[in-house]
Image (spheres, grey):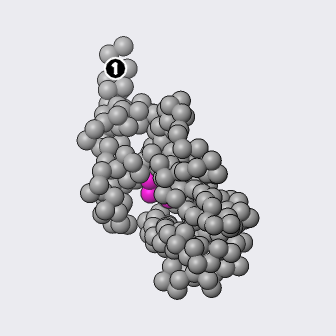
Amino acid sequence: MSMQTITRDEIATALELHERAYEALIWLSNISYARPQMLTSESAAVLQKADACVDWVSAHILDFLARVRPSPDDVQAFARLFASFFQTSFRIERRLRTREQDYRITRNRDEAAGRDRLSSRKVPRGLVRKRKDEATHLKYRALTYLADESTPGFWDCARELITEPSIRRELVLWTWACELVHRSRGEPHGPAVHILWRQMDDPTRKQISTERIWQAREHVTDALGASIRLHQRIEAKTNQER
């Protein structure tokens, strides 16, 4: 079985566009007070869907600040990342301002207010567990980019690695980076990605870079490879003793 890969260049591009999309998101929320036509009930629905968001960004590209504007070749990935924020940790909330409907982008569920909010404030415990399980699944998938999953012992070693405290920080960062690339491709995995973000410690969040992510990848690759080799030696010895 051929092993899928995520390249360093893909991560670098996704990371740069993610920063632009995040700044554009905050800008849109702020500018909506002065330009209410930028954030309406119609655009609120459009912005949360990757394909529709691509069309919206293309139509409004000159409205964005020059420093966050993507190149023509990157508009699609930029818009997909922009839309994915609404599937991870952001949402569009409706508030009343005098007699006009006013929309804004909020950063977390605790900011929800009033009966007109567009999404629920509280997340049920069962759903929280489900999202944590999904985040674990994403870690397994991130490991498949580092070794052929058909290799004998791969899944046993992956299971052990996911619960290994010494590799936790690097694995979470590598998994988050993989999902960033998926988000840029229009393949977001929703709130589970935000679980990964919350699992990072503050120093890691503040030092995210292509170099740091690639260092994490190498660390996880070495640990996974060592675990697989050990598993195979034990298995070979066991077979010889039978």
Residue 139 in the image, given as x and y percentages of width and height: 45, 43
Residue projecting furthest to the top: 242
Residue 187 in the image, given as x and y percentages of width and height: 61, 55
Would you say 89 lies left or right of 217 here?
right
Decide if residue 94 is in sight here: yes
Q: Callout 1, which amino acid?
A: Thr
- Please tell me which residue is depicted at 51% across the width and 45% down the height of the picture: 192
Please give the range of residues in magenta.
176-180
- Please tell me which residue is depicted at 52% across the width and 40% down the height of the picture: 122
Would you say 212 lies left or right of 111 here?
left
**Which of 180/125 is in front?**
125
Residue bearing the label numbered 1: 238
Density class for disc 1 (Cα within 10 Å; few <14, some 14-19, many ≥20) is few
- Please tell me which residue is depicted at 58% across the width and 78% down the height of the picture: 34
**Which of 39/7 is in front?**
39
**Which of 38/200 is in front?**
38
Residue 94 in the image, given as x and y percentages of width and height: 63, 58
Residue 111 in the image, given as x and y percentages of width and height: 49, 52
Q: Quadrant of the N terminus?
A: top right
